């Protein structure tokens, strides 16, 4: 499988629209329900990406570890 | 009639060794007649190595222990002449259901690959497993095989002397001494031998308690593995229901960490829990009820001079994934041919370093799998529970989430990539599953099966390739098993061993692990591989 680099430059066609939909998905949810939704969302997206290298880069970026940390990942 | 686990199977009787002036000397002493010690004694004796098996007890295992035995151990037992009786007695299963909260999220079929003699798993109580191995030992003894099993012989001390090992053994009639060239410690997770030698057993305890019950019932539950996460009858915890022979069912109920363990096993507390799980109308009797905590540990090295550790004495895993006895049998399989060659003077003692390397790798893999399962089943932080529940929730509707559900990854053998005994793969186009370091995959051969034809000993397996009938190097002979791809009309043999290659030559170890493979026979290459696989390169 071809390993892709995580895209960190603008890639969303309608940033404002997507952001609104993301928040709307949480409308009316309790904190616990929102946490659960976020977890489901991450899992769905991770499976869609399906590329371990990109996912590891995303994990490192989310942890603010920068690109060097990702290189050290297993 | 006494039940099997209450009956002395090998009652104490006085041995002439107890009256010897100079302690009697044995080739190999195996300490502990659990699943691993029994298999080890059978294997060595079948190879003509004199072996004495000692156990402090005189009967099979007590309490709720192993129930799930996987294909590879059954294949090993085929070589030891003991698998068929296990399969006949055991329950073969392949269906499972996963529940989350009050709903079933999905079901699965292990869909075992066709063309294997043995099923993916059988369920069989450990006490039956052990008694069937004892039966095999008694048969062998009756046929004058060099094996002896002594009950109520407890090893209390061990010293290394110039001539070998000296043991102190305690019996109902007092102590005596024994000498041994080699000692295999199969004395379980609490290994007294390990303690006598002052060796560590580092690892991790999982902070949780499990109520394990074996119940006898007539309930019409199907022959399936049912696993519940957070069920109504055990809120916030997990549960398992699995069938065993004789109408016995294994039930695991997670209890959490801070509980009163003594109260938990009292019938007045157990019965209402089980009733809530099984349904009001179901009649059941308790065979065993106990509370367990689980741990993962392993020794740093399994070989210490003339003492070799195998099974739970060397490594311990949580039962999720059924890797305890299953991996212990693989230890024994790996060890016995090596030790036999050393006893016969055909291989250097350094061959045992490969036992360490290969079985440490196996233990690491098992501990990793068992730890991951335990983390999924018993999430220890809020966020791990959130993700766990999200996986389960998604698994109801989305196939992608099901492989993430981890209620125990069932035991499969590891591939010894990088083993010092391997010769580099030289069969281009052949499938990875049978590369050097991998256990041979079974395949049908007309009325029979490949693994039975391999048996023990070194084998030069040729598929549509020419070679002499045998090849020898350094006193060890590999006999040829000449096959044609056409011997298996289903095509499995070719698919598993040739892939895109037109023909192949495999050198297979006595434990049925591939040592080397080539596109064509070459005497010098096979001899070099044979020397390498026996620790002389
Ligand atoms: C609840 C539970 C469920 C499990 N489920 C599974 C499963 O499904 N599948 C699986 O593969 N494994 C399972 N296991 C693990 C399995 O029971 C063990 O891995 C297995 O028993 C290990 O075998 P062993 O021969 O190494 O040691 P043991 O079975 O512990 O045997 C050790 C023997 O050594 C003897 N001994 C000890 N000290 C001395 C001494 N000083 N002198 C003489 N003899 C001595 C003891 O009497 C005993 O007979 C489970 C375990 C538990 C607790």
Image (cartoon, coloured by chain):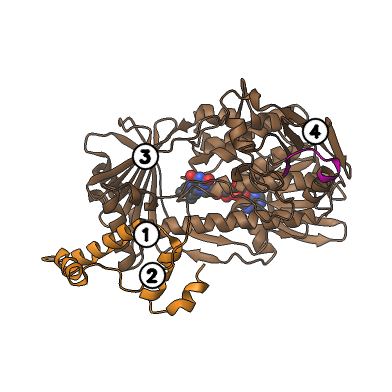
Chain colours: A orange, B brown
Pointer 4 indicates a residue of which chain?
A: B
Image height check: is B249 above or below B300? above
What stretch of residues is rendered in magenta?
B517-525
User: Badges 1 and 3: C-beta atoms under 8 Å apart?
Assistant: no
Give me the residue at 38% from left, 45% from top.
B213
Q: Nearer the viewer, mark 1 or mark 3?
A: 1
Estimate the x, y position of residue B270 in percent, counting from the top left.
31, 48
Estimate the x, y position of residue A9 in percent, counting from the top left.
34, 74
Q: Quadrant of the C terminus of chain B?
A: bottom right
Q: Are marks 3 and 4 on the same chain?
A: yes
Mark sitting on residue B46 = none
Estimate the x, y position of residue B63 in percent, counting from the top left.
47, 45
Residue under numbered circle 1: A49
Residue under numbered circle 3: B108
Residue under numbered circle 4: B479
Residue under numbered circle 2: A58
Image height check: is A17 above or below B340? below
Q: For this view, does B297 lie left or right of residue B172?
A: left
């Amino acid at each position: 499988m071809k390993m892709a680099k995580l895209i960190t430059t603008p890639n969303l066609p309608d940033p404002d629209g997507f952001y609104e939909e993301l928040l709307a998905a949480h409308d009316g949810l309790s904190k616990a329900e929102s946490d659960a939704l976020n977890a489901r969302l991450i899992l769905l997206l991770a499976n869609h990406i399906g590329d371990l290298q990109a996912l590891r880069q995303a994990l490192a970026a989310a942890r603010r570890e920068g690109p060097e940390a990702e290189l050290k990942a297993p | 009639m006494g039940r099997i686990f209450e009956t002395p199977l090998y009652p104490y009787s006085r041995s002439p060794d107890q009256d010897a002036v100079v302690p009697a000397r044995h080739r190999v002493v195996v300490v502990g007649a659990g699943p691993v010690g029994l298999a080890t004694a059978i294997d060595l004796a079948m190879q003509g190595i004199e072996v004495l098996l000692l156990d402090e007890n005189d009967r099979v295992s007590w309490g709720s222990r192993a129930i799930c035995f996987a294909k590879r151990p059954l294949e090993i037992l085929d070589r030891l002449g003991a698998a068929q009786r296990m399969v006949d007695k055991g329950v073969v299963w392949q269906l499972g259901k996963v529940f989350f909260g009050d709903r079933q999220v999905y079901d699965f079929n292990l869909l075992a690959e066709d063309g294997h003699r043995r099923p993916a798993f059988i369920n069989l109580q450990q006490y039956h497993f052990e008694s069937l191995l004892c039966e095999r030992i008694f048969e062998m003894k009756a046929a004058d095989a060099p094996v002896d099993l002594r009950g109520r012989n407890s090893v209390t001390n061990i010293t290394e002397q110039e001539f070998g090992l000296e043991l102190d053994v305690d019996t109902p009639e007092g102590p005596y001494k024994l000498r041994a060239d080699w000692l295999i410690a199969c004395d379980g997770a609490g290994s007294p031998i390990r303690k006598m030698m002052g060796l560590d057993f580092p690892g991790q305890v999982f902070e949780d308690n499990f109520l394990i019950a074996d119940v006898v019932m007539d309930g019409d539950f199907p022959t399936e593995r049912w696993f519940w996460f957070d069920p109504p009858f055990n809120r916030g915890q997990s549960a398992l229901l699995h069938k065993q022979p004789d109408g016995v069912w294994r039930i695991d109920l997670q209890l959490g960490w801070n509980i009163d363990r003594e109260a938990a096993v009292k019938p007045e507390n157990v019965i209402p829990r089980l009733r809530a799980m099984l349904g009001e109308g179901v009649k059941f009797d308790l065979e065993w009820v106990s509370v367990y905590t689980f741990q993962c540990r392993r020794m740093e090295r399994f070989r210490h001079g003339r003492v070799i550790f195998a099974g739970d004495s060397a490594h311990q895993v949580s039962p999720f994934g059924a890797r305890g006895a299953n991996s212990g049998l693989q230890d024994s399989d790996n060890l016995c041919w090596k030790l036999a060659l050393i006893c016969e003077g055909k291989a250097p003692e350094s061959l045992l370093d490969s036992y360490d390397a290969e079985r440490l790798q196996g233990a690491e893999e098992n501990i990793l799998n068992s730890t991951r399962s335990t983390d999924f089943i018993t999430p220890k932080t809020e966020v791990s529970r959130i993700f766990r529940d999200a996986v389960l929730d998604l698994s109801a509707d989305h196939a992608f989430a099901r492989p993430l559900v981890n209620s125990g990854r069932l035991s499969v053998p590891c591939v010894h990539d990088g083993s010092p005994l391997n010769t580099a793969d030289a069969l281009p186009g052949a499938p990875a599953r049978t590369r050097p370091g991998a256990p041979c995959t079974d395949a049908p051969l007309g009325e029979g099966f490949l693994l039975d034809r391999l048996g023990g000993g070194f084998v030069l397996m040729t598929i549509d390739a020419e070679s002499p009938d045998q090849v020898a190097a350094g006193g060890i002979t590999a006999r040829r098993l000449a096959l044609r791809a056409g011997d298996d009309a289903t095509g499995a043999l070719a698919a598993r061993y040739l892939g895109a290659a037109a023909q192949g030559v495999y050198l297979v170890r006595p434990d049925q692990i591939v040592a080397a493979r080539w596109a064509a026979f070459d005497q010098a290459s096979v001899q070099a591989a044979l020397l390498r696989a026996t620790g002389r390169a």
